[in-house]
């Protein structure tokens, strides 16, 4: 047994995916299952497929390469780097793009390899991350793309609630759909994919307000069952498919406020403390290199997370009904950031069940 350990329940993930897929199907929306939160692990991706996703999608080419043996189309979510276009052509079926220079570079390689690479053009509806911001710029780009023999434009997409925290509204989706129609009318072509965003758009799908989009790219809502715009749990899903187990390495009664002049902590912040008197402090063998203290929640709700440094997690076990001993295991439910870090950390072992 090695700790820390991340336990992943594949059946729970599959059930989450089917619950979300039922909602999407009612709206005529296909799901691209986003695998980046678990670093493209092929077994977890397989649970996505069993749950009913139509594509797998990731931001990192390394993850997409891990998925190459799964018989399903793969999407590259992050706008490709010029340094990775060869891999994009080799491993990705559909990539999301917003720079004509990159699209031409992909087209050139695809043509050399006798392939046609499919792309979705991104439009920015105000969240201010990727995508064209001006509609005419986008339409001009379509004209240029149609000259590329190695490229086929198959859709338009948008991303919200990432950088700017902008909540997707029905009006945003209507605008994306109308941009798609305009491309079809001007250039006499048919687009297959109108990709209306990430998990933050699910609140609209739950109300049947998807306005004609036909695809969503979902990560968080599948692994955690949460609808992030309003932080609700989607009916039929669970939030504990991923559980982190850590081992206690020290238990001592100590005061709650450090003694001495307070300067900066290990991360350069000046810490503050609540004085609860002398407490049972438990140190566990994991740290901020592997987790994020704000997005992990002890399953024993009487445990308080006091803080941590790169390699140490400090808990207050005074109020717990369990009499913890050195060597005992403490379990946590994780939300997005901690899950991402724990999956990424080579110091956390993973057990899929
Ligand atoms: C990460 C990502 C997603 C998935 O986001 P979730 O909030 O996890 O559903 C969708 N689209 C793009 C472009 C992304 O980068």
Image (cartoon, rainbow, N blue to C red):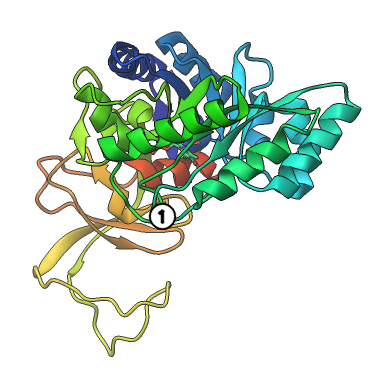
Q: Residue at x 45, y 58 (%)?
A: 311
Q: Residue at x 49, y 32 (%)?
A: 182
The residue sitting at the right extreme is 112
Asked if residue 336 shows in the view, the reply is yes
Residue 296 or residue 175, whichever sits in front: 175
Residue 97 or residue 63, whichever sits in front: 97
Is 332 placed left or right of 32 in the picture?
A: left
Image region (quadrant) for ligand 1: top left
Q: Residue 45: percent from the left, percent from the top?
A: 52, 21
Residue 268 or residue 255, whichever sits in front: 268
In the picture, residue 254 is in which quadrant? Answer: bottom left
Is 74 placed left or right of 148 in the picture?
A: left
Asked if residue 238 shows in the view, the reply is no
In the picture, residue 244 is in which quadrant? Answer: top left
346 is higher (above) or lower (below) than 256: above
Q: Residue 164: percent from the left, percent from the top?
A: 36, 56
Q: Residue at x 27, y 25 (%)?
A: 205
* Element under disc 1: loop
What residue is pinned by disc 1? 163
């Amino acid at each position: 047994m090695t700790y820390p350990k991340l336990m992943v329940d594949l059946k729970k993930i599959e059930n989450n995916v089917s619950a979300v897929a039922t909602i999407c199907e009612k709206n005529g929306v296909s799901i691209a299952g986003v695998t980046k939160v678990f670093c493209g692990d092929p077994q977890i991706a397989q649970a996505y497929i069993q749950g009913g996703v139509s594509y797998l999608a990731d931001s990192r080419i390394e993850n997409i390469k891990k998925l190459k043996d799964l018989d399903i189309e793969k999407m590259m979510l992050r706008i490709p780097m010029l340094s990775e276009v060869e891999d994009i052509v080799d491993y990705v079926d559909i990539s999301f793009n917003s720079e004509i220079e990159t699209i031409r570079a992909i087209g050139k390689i695809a043509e050399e390899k006798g392939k046609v690479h499919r792309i979705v053009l991104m439009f920015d509806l105000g969240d201010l991350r990727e995508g064209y911001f001006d509609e005419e710029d986008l339409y001009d780009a379509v004209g240029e793309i149609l000259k590329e023999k190695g490229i086929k434009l198959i859709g338009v997409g948008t991303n919200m609630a990432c950088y700017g925290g902008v909540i997707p509204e029905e009006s945003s989706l209507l605008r994306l759909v109308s941009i798609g129609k305009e491309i079809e009318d001007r250039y006499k072509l048919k687009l297959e994919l109108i990709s209306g965003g990430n998990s933050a758009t699910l609140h609209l799908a739950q109300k049947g307000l998807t306005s004609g989009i036909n695809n969503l790219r979902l990560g968080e809502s599948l692994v955690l069952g949460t609808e992030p715009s309003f932080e609700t749990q989607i009916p039929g899903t669970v939030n504990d498919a991923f559980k982190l187990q850590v081992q206690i390495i020290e238990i001592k009664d100590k005061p709650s406020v450090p003694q001495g002049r307070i300067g900066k902590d290990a991360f350069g912040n000046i810490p503050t403390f609540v004085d609860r008197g002398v407490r049972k402090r438990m140190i566990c063998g994991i740290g901020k290199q592997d987790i994020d203290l704000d997005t992990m929640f002890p399953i024993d709700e009487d445990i308080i997370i006091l803080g941590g440094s790169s390699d140490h997690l400090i808990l207050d076990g005074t109020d717990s009904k369990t009499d913890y001993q050195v060597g005992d295991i403490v379990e946590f439910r994780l939300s997005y950031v901690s899950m991402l870090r724990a999956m990424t950390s080579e110091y956390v072992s993973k057990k899929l069940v």
